[in-house]
Structures are given as structure tokens and as C-alpha cells.
Amino acid sequence: MTLLTVWADDDPSSVLSRTTDGEQIARELKPLGVRFERWPLAGDLPAEPTPQEVLAAYAPHVRRVIDTEGYVLVDAMSMSPSGDPERAAEARRKFLAEHTHDDDEDRFFARGAGAFYLHIGGKVYAVLCEAGDMLSVPADTPHWFDMGSRPDYVAIRFFHQEDGWVGDFTGSRLAEALPDFDTLFAAR
């Protein structure tokens, strides 16, 4: 179940709000320029889908996002608990550091879960996304992503630039003060 949790960035011990209601999540994020929507799940994906199978299963939705947002590169990637643990740990460390992008960061979760933490206006908005969730983080928004200690997800990624994911790290250590993915996932 999708979960939005909000903290003040100067008091990560106090939850300001928390909801699992998808419509409320979309309403709360919209004024921040963050787009949240839910797509119906494709039931015909194999257990270990290729990127091509994922993109084909969601082709109408992917086409709509490309047409609406002007993306030029779309791919699908996955992380699995049965995959390379060193690769997973390295990826988790990289994405856990607060960063920004010159581009929007749009992700659709076809399977599994991950948490985006958005640092906006003195607050941190943690969006625990699960299968069927699409989240668009606006360019230049400080954020980080946590895939958990045992990553398990398949995601479609959208880019306006051919060079794909490029992060500008802020040096903030705020991520260390907030509950991680594993804690959020267990508490939902």
C-alpha cells in the first residue's frame, strides 16, 4: 500500500502527516509540482521480465507520458533480492544521498516498491511507492531514493536527456536522520 509520510526537516522525530489514501497523496503533492498517479497493473508480466516486456506491457501509458511530457529516453530496470548483493548495496548507497537533477525524475513501479524522499519547503515528504504508482519529481528538487536492504522492484524510467540519470549531490546528511525504506515498509 502506498504511503505518504511528512516530517519537518528540523524535527524528523515528529510526523506531521501520514496517509495511504492515493487521492489525498496526489492532492498533497500537487502544490509542490509533484505528480502522483496510479496505473492499472499489467497481469501478463513474467517473473523476471526483460525491459522490452515491461515497456510493451505498459505501452499506452508510456506513450501518454512521452506525448504529454516530451521525454526522449524511456527504459525499464529491475532490482531483485536474488540479484548481485554488491550491486544492490552500491546502488542503494548512491541513491540514498540527497541530490537534484536538471531533469524531472519520473518513475513508474511495475512491481515491488521503493521510497522517494522529497526535501521541499522545510519538510521531507516520503512517498513509499508500490506497484502501480507513478511519481514525477520536478527538476531541481532535492530528494533521495531508498530501495531497501533487499531491493525488489521493476520500474520504468523517463528522461528528457539522452544521458539518462545524472545526479548533483547536495552533501546533506538529512537522509540519515529519517526512517529508511525498511522502516517505512514495515510500518505501513
Image: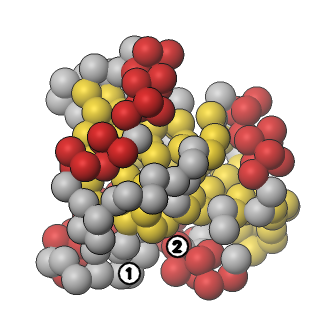
Three-letter amino acid code at the position of disc 1? Ser
Answer few, some or many: residues within 10 Å of disc 1's Cα (few below 14, many 20 plus, some between 14 and 19): some
- The vertical placement of 157 against 183, above or below, is above
Q: Which numbered tag is attached to residue 115? A: none
Quadrant of the image occupied by residue 94: bottom left
Quadrant of the image occupied by residue 159: top left
Q: Residue at x 69, y 63 (%)?
A: 3
Residue lying furthest front: 44
Q: Residue at x 29, y 81 (%)?
A: 81
Q: Secondary structure at mark 2?
A: helix
Where does the image place residue 108, in percent across and percent down from the top left?
46, 46
Q: Quadrant of the C terminus?
A: bottom right
Quadrant of the image occupied by residue 60: top left
The residue identified by callout 2 is 181
Where does the image place residue 76, in percent across and percent down from the top left?
28, 47
The residue identified by callout 1 is 149
Residues under numbered marks 2 and 1 in contact, where contact means CB atoms less than 8 Å apart: yes
Whether residue 7 sits left or right of residue 107 in the image: it is right
> Label 2 to label 1, Cα distance in Å?
8 Å
